[in-house]
Image: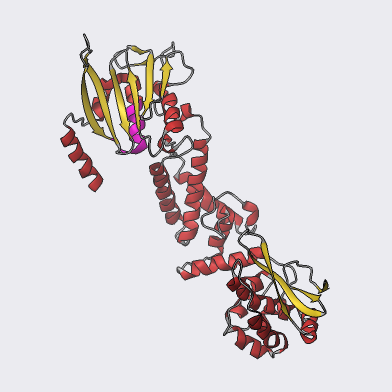
Amino acid sequence: MRDIVFTRRSGWIPNVVREDGELKLTLGAGADANHEPRTFTFSIGEAHLAVIREDLARHLLLWSAALPLCDDAGTRGRLDENAAVALLDPILLGAPADVDALFRRIRWDRSRLIAHGADIGLLERGQVCAAMRAATETSNGKRAQEYHADRRRAERGAVLGPLDAAILRFTGQYLHGGTVPRRMPDAVEPALLPEVLRVIATAEQACAALRIGRDPRRGNRATDRHDWHRMETGVEAAVRRAHPELVDDAVRTVSFLMCSEAADRSRNTPMEDDDEGADHRTDLDGGARTDGGARKTVLSFTDDKGAEKKWRQDSPRTATAEFWEFVGDRSATDNEVFTIEDEEMGEGIQLHFYADSVARVTTLREGEGGSDPEYRVEYGLVDGIGGYRKLVSTFVRGGCAALEQHGPWMSDVAEFERARRRRDAR
């Protein structure tokens, strides 16, 4: 039979119960192998109960010291009750100086005390009893999170000024640098908000002419890493020039915000609007035109897994848009070769995403009487998704002949492999 003898408003602060006539402190900590909360208990005396009732600070200090013992128990081990009981008299009944000395020797949960209002400066100087004079029964977990975030920054030598901190709060990255940034003006003190917005305006101006395009090689919602890096570099350089007082953390969070917003705009833009060949889309009848004026009526898209998709001149979308959607839907680590073929003209290009290369294939002689057709195959190097987009757009507009400007093209495989190795070595 268990009866609750004493409890506080916060459900996590340890309770005192009477079990079979014996007083025990009970606290929840950790989880078992099934991720269910674990509860631990150990015996206390009437004198300990009296202090727990009357002295919130001592109650919280005991909790802080007991939690590491619960951690040691893990998911299925037993609490070291002897070690827990040994904490009672020194913490609850000892003189403040002796309590401070004890906390310099034992492990204890600092974040729990900070969440309940402990003075951080006094805690760090080892004056735990004095630090707990401002303790509150209610918990503020965010305060503890901010403390640990500041400690992580301090360990790598980053000290935030008021504007730095305000910028990190504005982007929502004060606690966790990996959090996707967003604009949170309400999180900033009103007096600092105009300064924060001036920094943001500098960043917006720096990336006004830049964009982050899509990279269908990595899926329909993936974006171009090269574009991201270019925008990131440009924003950080501009912000550092205009606001040299800012620390790196603040500068990086601003560039992260700009890049994230640009990437989101790209992901939510229809593929046609992301098409570098959009200005060259169609003639009046909707067909893609070649440089020589001949209309491409049908294009065939294939991948390395045997999938095929046809684009026809009456399609409401551009050939390039449909091709890149096909790539985004089908591309994978084991599916990195895609082909665009114009069967009528007897030509096509094959994109090798795994090697940043392309092959243009032209039919020299059709197969007759059971003989195989004869092809001319030439290889070229490609610079990222931007290079692929230009090649695809150019081929759709002008066929293999129009690709000449995007060379050099190499028909000798060994020569091409040497060129590829030289590029990769750089």
Position of residue 300 measured from the top left corner of the image (x, y, whole percent): 37, 20
Above or below: residue 371 compared with residue 408 = above
Q: Is residue 16 left or right of residue 168?
A: right
Using the image as rendered, state which of residue 158 and residue 112 is in the foreground: 112
Image quadrant where residue 24 sits: bottom right
Using the image as rendered, state which of residue 240 and residue 165 is in the foreground: 165
Say if residue 172 shows up in the picture: yes
Position of residue 210 measured from the top left corner of the image (x, y, whole percent): 43, 40
Above or below: residue 194 compared with residue 385 = below
Q: Give the range drawn in magenta.
A: 382-392
Number of numbered callouts drawn: 0
Q: Which colour scheme is used?
A: secondary structure
Q: Which residue occupies 61% across, 86% down?
A: 102
Q: Which residue occupies 57% across, 49% down?
A: 182
Q: Which residue occupies 47% across, 62% down?
A: 247
The quarter in which the N terminus is drawn is bottom right
Image quadrant where residue 95 sits: bottom right
Position of residue 90 measured from the top left corner of the image (x, y, whole percent): 67, 88
Using the image as rendered, state which of residue 16 and residue 206 is in the foreground: 16
Magenta residues, dominant SS class: helix
Magenta-span inclusion, residue 385: yes
Using the image as rendered, state which of residue 167 and residue 95 is in the foreground: 95
Position of residue 84 measured from the top left corner of the image (x, y, whole percent): 66, 81
Say if residue 426 shows up in the picture: no
Magenta-span inclusion, residue 141: no
